[in-house]
Image (spheres, helix red, strand yellow):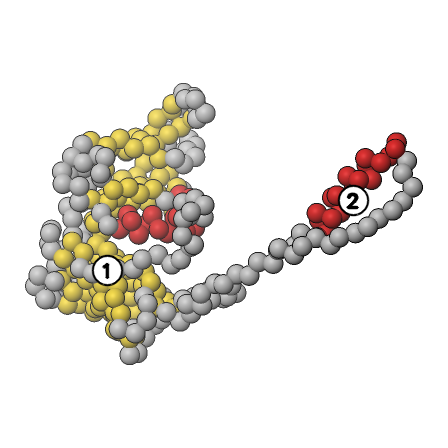
């Protein structure tokens, strides 16, 4: 911080307006003399691979999105990678299938890999001379949405009266599950970070779960809700995404950085995640009351 300048000012003093002049001088010195220059040192992690990939066991399908990172203030979108070799492997059997490039994503819709509960799956990616391998992820049992109902609830504290969507499911015992809810309203996916709903099962292990969706609901709206069952560690990845997007965890939290990946590479850092997913879904149309 620069030291404020020192002045010696002399003028005839009129006591009736002395204090306003002193106050104005004080504000002038504070505003003009106290200057702090702030420099931002943002890491330039450009050109590094970013992978988002899933193996949907109940659908026996897989997809992967691969791009390269750009500078923090870059005005362009991250460039997609279309020349990768992407392989899905079933660890216990050694079976492998190749994902094919289609419409900006890599997709697999069949092959020798088979969905088997408790089996582990991983993704291998080769781009030019870079080789990436994900951590092996277990395929978990599909947790079903046992019921999805619409109802009209009276006002509750700060929550106004209105239509609500209520879901019911049953968590298996063992504290292995993570969950993510994905909701479509009138055929539009509600997918902003503020609309993400996810949790692990540390507080609900083995119990029935009743959940209320926090979205605006109107008569005749159509909703489709997917319940994703994931390995529990995936929720920690989601936590990092949300924490970085909304400013960390307080004044003593570390500076924002890219989230941890479960990929390892032989050249540079890798960002992104691969996970297995088991999906169940239900839809409804909201009835007028």
Measured along the vertical axis of the image, is residue 165 above or below residue 109?
Answer: above
Which residue is drawn at the image coordinates 45% and 25% (left, top)? 158
Q: Residues within 10 Å of mark 2 (few under 14, many from 20)?
A: few
Residue for badge 1? 62
Q: Secondary structure at mark 2?
A: helix
- In the displayed structure, 188 sits above or below 203; it is below
Tell me which corner region of the image, top left, top right, bottom left or bottom right, holds residue 179: top left
Residue depicted at x 18% and y 56%:
137
Please state the horizontal and vertical placement of residue 41, each as a whole percent of the image: 49, 63
Q: Quadrant of the N terminus?
A: bottom right
Rendered position, 188 above or below 163: below
- Using the numbered discs, state the Cα–Cα distance from disc 2 to disc 1 in whole angstroms: 69 Å
User: Considering the image in quadrants, where does the C terminus appear?
Assistant: top left
Across and down, in percent, residue 186 comes to 40, 42
What residue lies at 37% left-to-right and 38% top-to-bottom? 222
* Between 239 and 122, the one nearer to me in the picture: 239
Residue furthest bottom as drawn: 129
Which mark is first along the chain, 1 or 2? 2
- Is residue 57 shown left or right of residue 82? left
Q: Quadrant of residue 78?
A: bottom left
State which quadrant residue 124 falls in. Answer: bottom left
Mark 2 sits on what residue? 25
Which labelled disc corresponds to residue 149? none
Of 284 and 40, nearer the camera is 40
Nearer the observer, 157 or 258:
258
| Front tag of 2 and 1 | 2
């Amino acid at each position: 911080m620069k030291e404020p300048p020192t002045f010696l000012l002399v003028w005839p003093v009129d006591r009736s307006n002395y204090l306003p002049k002193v106050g104005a001088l004080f504000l002038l010195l504070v505003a003009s003399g106290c200057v702090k220059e702030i420099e931002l040192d943002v890491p330039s992690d450009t050109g590094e691979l970013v992978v988002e990939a899933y193996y949907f066991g109940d659908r026996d399908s897989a997809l992967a999105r691969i791009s390269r990172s750009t500078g923090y203030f870059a005005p362009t979108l991250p460039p997609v990678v279309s020349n990768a070799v992407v392989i899905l492997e079933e660890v216990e059997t050694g079976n492998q299938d190749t994902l094919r490039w289609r419409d900006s994503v890599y997709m697999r819709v069949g092959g020798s890999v088979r969905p088997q509960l408790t089996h582990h799956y991983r993704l291998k990616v080769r781009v030019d001379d870079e080789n990436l391998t994900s951590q092996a992820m277990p395929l978990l049992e599909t947790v079903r949405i046992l019921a999805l109902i619409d109802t009209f609830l009276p006002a509750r504290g700060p929550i106004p009266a209105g239509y609500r969507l209520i879901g019911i499911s049953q968590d298996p015992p063992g504290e292995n599950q993570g969950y993510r809810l994905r909701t479509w309203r009138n055929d539009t996916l509600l997918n902003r970070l503020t609309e993400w709903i996810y949790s692990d099962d540390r507080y609900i292990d083995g119990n029935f779960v009743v959940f209320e969706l926090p979205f605006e609901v109107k008569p005749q709206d159509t909703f489709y809700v997917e319940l994703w069952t994931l390995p529990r560690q995936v929720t920690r990845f989601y936590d990092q995404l949300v924490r970085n997007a909304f400013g960390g965890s307080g004044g003593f939290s570390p500076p924002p950085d890219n989230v941890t990946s479960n990929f390892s590479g032989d050249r540079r850092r890798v960002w992104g995640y691969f996970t297995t997913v088991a999906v169940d879904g239900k839809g409804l149309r909201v009835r007028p009351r």
